[in-house]
Amino acid sequence: MLKHARVSDPEVYKLTLEELTRQEHNIEMIASESTAALEVMELTGSIWTNKTLEGYPGARFQAGSHVADKLETLANQRAMDLYGADHVNLQPYSGSTANYAVYSAVLKPGDRVLGMRLDQGGHLTHGSPANFLSKVYQFDFYGVNQETETIDYEALEKKAKEFQPKLIIEGGSSYPRLIDYERIGAIAKSVGAFSMVDMAHVSGLIAAKVIPSPVPHTDFVSSSTTKTFCGPRSGMVLCKKEFAKQLDRGVFPGALGSMHLHTMAAKAWCFKQMAGAEYKVAMTQVVKNAKKLAEELAKYGFRIVSGGTDNHLILADLRPKGITGKVFQDALDSVGITVNKNQIPFDPEKPTIASGVRIGLTSVTQRGLKEKEIEAIAKIMDKVSSAPEDEANLKACREQAEKLIANFPLYPAGSFDD
Ligand SMILES: *Cc1c(COP(=O)(O)O)cnc(C)c1O
């Protein structure tokens, strides 16, 4: 691996090797993570990095674009076919910048935006006071019903009527349930607002048709191309035909500079893979594994927020176990299981402590883990939770976790041998 950097920069080479070892030996269950294919590594490390290009195929600001034009056109066509979308823009650098590009396309400073509360599943780029956009636009929020812990659509509609937003945002980072895109799309129309779904977490499940698509019901659909997409660190926006020009201007020159052709090449490769049967099987198993883990953890006395999951992630409330998200995250990390602490809806704890953890099943499913292994992981997690500060307990758990994951290589043997 890295046969040139190994020689010219042993320090960075060693850190990269150390991180590979960590990933190999860990049970990786951060909901926003997945493992990129070797082809994604090849293409993102390719000569496409050398080319600077602004504009769109046929209307570039730099010469030497005729090959890149073919690449972007191919990638766009594959994306539109895969998602059944009228138009796509693949130039955003990530999920965050994909959102910024949509805002730049449809909003003016001071405009009103309605998004999902961050502490109930939304995202930092949907109006968090910590994000600079909260100073540019006026954000207000909807949330979940306290009993069902699913989106309160009546309250959303009421708020939309009162607040009269220019844009309604759907989708989030820690929402384990399906979203009624049709209903929110109709609410947006009824108040004269644009609708945007940020499908960053679930774009892979949607591509594989394992869960319903927002595309028919929504003006703009933004995404990361990591997470369940399993691709390079990049982004994209899909939209309806009538907004194509507006979106393209919003992306460039509205929000971004020159495009990243190395990730464009990797995304093109991904779209082709994602249309195939193998990807569908994998995504189907991701959801099966998530449901299985929710069931098993519930048996051990964890409270599963909203009572289960429809996608790749679950939120577990740890209060019945008498521990906090922070304590559990740290204890699990020490045994080689990686999750993140996460606030649950109406959480009495602050975000740095949190009453819950968010657990995602994409990475472990890609490695080949199925229901039987998920049962074993739930058992280890329960054992960790029973004595999260007991060294002997943690040591026993670490050995079990290591043994389990050792049978499921991260990449095929020899992938990084030169
Ligand atoms: C992860 C995420 C983003 C940000 O994506 P990056 O690719 O990390 O920039 C935006 N929106 C949601 C809902 C996300 O989950």
Image (tube, rainbow, N blue to C red):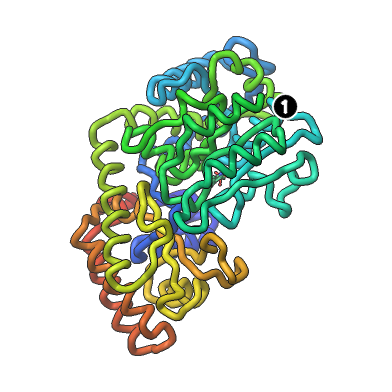
Q: Is residue 19 above or below residue 362?
A: below
Q: Is residue 250 left or right of residue 196?
A: right
Q: Is residue 19 above or below residue 221?
A: below
Q: Position of residue 408 (x, y in %)?
A: 24, 58
Q: Quadrant of residue 220?
A: top right
Q: Position of residue 217 (x, y in %)?
A: 48, 25
**Quadrant assignment for ligand 1:** top right
Q: Position of residue 414 (x, y in %)?
A: 27, 52
Q: Position of residue 37 (x, y in %)?
A: 36, 42
Q: Is residue 225 visible?
A: yes
Q: Quadrant of residue 156?
A: top right
Q: Which residue is pictured at 38% across the width and 60% down the height?
A: 28
What secondary structure is marked by label 1?
A: loop
Q: Is residue 256 visible?
A: no
Q: Which residue is pictured at 47% across the width and 30% down the height?
A: 182
Q: Is residue 265 above or below residue 77?
A: below
Report which residue position mark 1 lands on.
Answer: 254
Farthest left residue in view: 372
Disc 1: CA contacts within 10 A as few (<14), some (14-19) or many (>=20)? some
Farthest top residue in view: 58
Q: Is residue 349 left or right of residue 182?
A: right
Q: Which residue is pictured at 27% across the width and 42% down the height?
A: 284
Q: Which residue is pictured at 38% across the width and 78% down the height?
A: 385
Amino acid type of the residue that numbered disc 1 sits on in the rendered structure: Gly
Please tell me which residue lies in front, 418 or 108: 108
Please tell me which residue lies in front, 31 or 296: 296
